[in-house]
Image: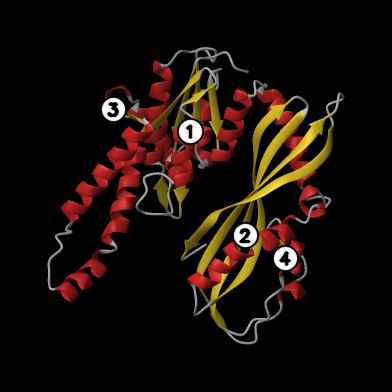
Amino acid sequence: MAGFTLIKIFSDTNIIHAAQAHLLLPAKISEYIAEHKKIESVEVKWLLPKMVVSERRHQMLLAAKALNPKIAELEKLLGHNLGFNDDVLAERIDSKINKVIVELGIDICDIDSSSVDWDELIDRSAKRMPPFEISGDKEKGFRDAIIATTFLQQHKKSPVTARACLLIFISGDERLREYVQEKTAEAKNVRILDSLDELKSLLNSIASEISEEYLNEISAKAKLIFYDFSKNEGLYSSSDVIEGIFAKFSTEIEKINAAFPESRSKLESVIIGEQTFIKKIGQTVFWSHEIILKFQILVGGNDTLVNPAAYAAILGGRLLGDSLLGKAASVERIVSYVTTTFAVEWQHQITTKGNISKPKINSIDFIGHTFSSDK
């Protein structure tokens, strides 16, 4: 699969959105970029359209301004003006953004507005063609169109063969991906992905020198080995992954309750998340699977909470038997949500006939908690 000398990676805003308002990029993405400036002999360039940076700046500034009432209260308490006006906040955020961009070596791509086919975009907007769509009763898609056009302009400037340069576009927006796919349908050096995990799998396959076709083939087989939803069976259940998580990481899970001392947590669902290809050594293939636990933080009521062993009956976000969860004795109220993520690394063998054998769990790692006021 290797052979080209340069990979350019573009990201949409929804891929780099950070739950923590003070970060331009989520910590895991910043770490990944820092570690992947090169894959073997292939140079990797990370690029962000200027529109994406502007969107993140806007989100960060809104979060900063939301703290103004608390700052005002602190100033009253201290009897001193701290000088945090809107101009100062904007200046500090700009400084922080620039620092991250320089440290990670990210290239910011601006759009050449003079070469944009505005008539076509206006027509697409009127007809709600990709990347435009109707959101509620309003048209949505202008920012997406700018992001896509920025990518397409960069593609036009780049070498046309994958052997020289591979361009990767990542977006969680289906309409945006559809538009870029349409505009690059004839290109052999463009890959359109929908998640960071897909990107990791692709880059790891390049490092392992296996083809995309082979990766797609074994990936489909591996997903069914890890957990086959149609049969309700797989390595996930046979290895008691959920029970193992609660046994190994009980301290981390207890931190949820510690963060909300006047409330209680209740497991809402367990989701088997993205699968990521790690590497292939000989006939042994290594994968990582996300396991996501979603908790409700409750006040009021008097729930009978399920014991950890019963969590094993919750698969892929579906509850198998309401009796396992108990019943609320009185009205309760959800005040927050917590998403807790784990990574399960596992491996299997590839037989001479291309079948999968000897799957086993290697490790389970705690990734972190994300706290949110809504789902």
Q: Specify the quadrant of the image occupied by residue 296.
A: bottom right
Residue 89, can we see it?
yes
Circle 3: element type: helix
Left or right side of 354 for 61 = left
Residue 311 is labelled as 4
Front in this rendered view, residue 305 or 169: 305
Marks 2/4: CA–CA distance: 10 Å
Distance in Å between CA atoms under marks 1 and 4: 36 Å
- Quadrant for the N terminus in the image: top right
Label 3 sits on what residue type?
A: Ser
Measured Cα–Cα span from mark 2 to mark 3: 45 Å
Mark 4: amino acid:
Tyr
Q: Which mark is residue 67?
A: none
> Which callout, 1 or 3, points at the residue further toward the start of the chain?
1
Name the residue beneath numbered marker 2. Answer: 293
Residue wearing tag 1: 35
Helix, strand or loop for disc 1: helix
Looking at the rendered structure, which numbered label has been put on residue 113? 3
Of residues 337 and 280, which is closer to you in this image?
A: 280
Q: Nearer the viewer, residue 129 or 262?
A: 262
Residue 356, placed above or below residue 262: above
